[in-house]
Amino acid sequence: MAMKVTQTVHYEGASTRTPIDSKLEMDVHKRLVVDRVNGEIIKDSHWQGKFSNFKLIATPIVPGFVADQAVVGGKAINVFHPNETYTVKYELNKKPIADQTVKIEYVDILDDNKVIATDEVKGKANMPISYDAEAKIAALGEQGFDLVDNSFNGDGNVQFFGDSEQVPVFVITMKHNYALVNEKHPLDGVDKKEYSKEISFIVNFTGAGDKTPKPKKQTAVSFAFCNAQE
């Protein structure tokens, strides 16, 4: 079974500068194992997609206007509400200010879009934002996170400060990854007891009188596999 779920962000109120709608689609699927005799569902994998959440969408900065929301979206996928829609409204900025601040937030899409790192950059209204996300992305990579989407400057675009008292937010989406941990692939911070265990058992013999063999102790090592976040 398969279906599409969507997230749409509609923008309005900024005249000819109004951003075009943002629309994301995701394919979700599930598998059922059914008893062909009585029709009973034996196994249900439940609905699954590439991610369990949609991406958060940062509201574009439009000079001369103020948006009513800085970030929208990012909800968990819900097949009972497959088409999530948000509306962001702009209005004229009647109180322009010279000193500006923006936030760059790094979120983990596999952990309900939890914020894992934040940077603030200050500057002057309508001037280019001087910030390179690559160093922080690399640092998070060392901690076990992979880049999903760099909406700040991933496509080479230059972002600009606004001119209102609102603090815009740029979202860079990451995902934590997993490592297979076992005897051949140990990982610092994971106790060996989590994936390796020594098992002993004793074999007792009876019925041969004084020729009965003595008990023998056997030892074996049991291995398991552990998926750990790097």
Image (tube, grey):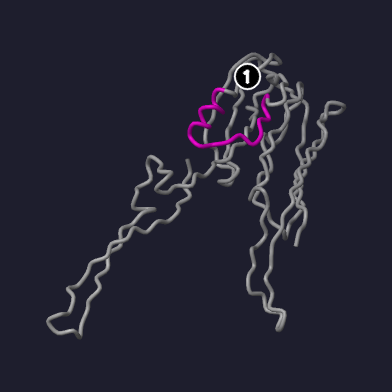
In magenta, the rendered stretch is 135-153
Kindly indicate the quadrant of the structure image that contains residue 216. bottom left
Q: In the rendered view, tell whether residue 194 sits above or below residue 118.
A: below
Q: Nearer the viewer, residue 91 or 201?
A: 201
In percent of the image, x 60 and y 43: which residue is there?
A: 109
- The residue sitting at the left extreme is 210
Q: Residue 117's x, y, as percent?
A: 52, 32
Q: Find numbered disc 1 in the image and state the secondary structure of the residue it sits on.
A: strand
- The residue sitting at the right extreme is 16
Q: Residue 169's x, y, as percent?
A: 64, 30
Residue 137: within the magenta?
yes
In percent of the image, x 69 and y 43: which residue is there?
A: 73
Q: Nearer the viewer, residue 49 or 116?
A: 49
Determine which residue is flagged by label 1: 100
In percent of the image, x 25 and y 73: which residue is there?
A: 203
Quadrant assignment for the N terminus: bottom right
Q: In the rendered view, tell whether residue 132 sits above or below residue 2.
A: above
Left or right of 62? Residue 220 is left
Residue 77: within the magenta?
no
Q: Residue 220's x, y, as percent?
A: 32, 61
Left or right of 54? Residue 207 is left
